[in-house]
Amino acid sequence: MNYGHELKSMSQGPLKIRSFTDLDAWKEGHQLVLMTYKNTRLFPKGEQFALTAQMRRAVVSVTSNIAEGFSRNSYREKAQFYAMALGSLTEVHNQFIIAKDIGYLPHEAFADIEAQAVKVHKITNGLIKKSRSLIPDS
């Protein structure tokens, strides 16, 4: 997991994280975005402007907040945006539970999505903790 601003490369030594796309939290969140779009395509057409749209907005918000947090200069702001990403992640997790419970999502698809959501949550929580630890006088 990459919480700081360096990636470890066994052959080349540390590599600087130059973009939000280098963060593990964003990479794993992006996989969750792709899973969400793939699975919501199978939802009934009547949900296109309801649950489907809401889930897609929430999951895109996860990676968008990680990206925006990365671009902030203060660790306090970074932590704030990473925390907003966790809020959106919790929202989309709840929506997937609803989709499963009303029969829009097979159990095994839900299990895969839930495992990915937990992974994103853990990594993003690590970003928050690391950012908060670097705030002066905190």
Image: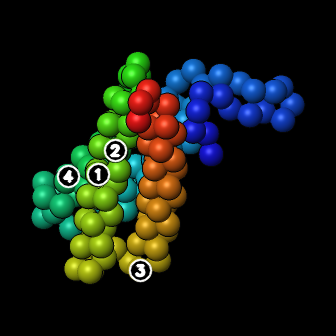
Q: Tell me the number on the disc at residue 53.
A: 4
Q: Residue 78: image x %, image y %? A: 39, 31
Q: CA distance from mark 4 to mark 3?
A: 21 Å
* Alpha-carbon span between mark 1 and mark 3: 24 Å
- Tag 2 secondary structure: helix
Question: Is residue 22 shown left or right of residue 49?
Answer: right
How many residues crowd around disc 3 within 10 Å: few (fewer than 14), some, or many (20 or more)? few
> What residue would you read off at disc 3?
107
Please report contact status of discs 4 and 3: CB closer than 8 Å, yes or no. no
Q: Is residue 110 left or right of residue 1?
A: left
- Could you tell which of marks 3 and 2 lies nearer the N-terminus? 2
Question: Secondary structure under badge 3?
Answer: helix
**Residue type at mark 3?**
His
Work out whether 56 lies above or below 131.
below
Crowd tier of the residue under label 4, counting other residues whose Cα lies within 10 Å: few below 14, some 14–19, many 20 or above: few
Residue of label 2 = 83
Few, some or many C-alpha atoms within 10 Å of disc 2 (few <14, some 14-19, many ≥20)?
A: many
The residue that disc 1 covers is 87
What's the CA distance linking mark 2 and mark 4? Answer: 22 Å
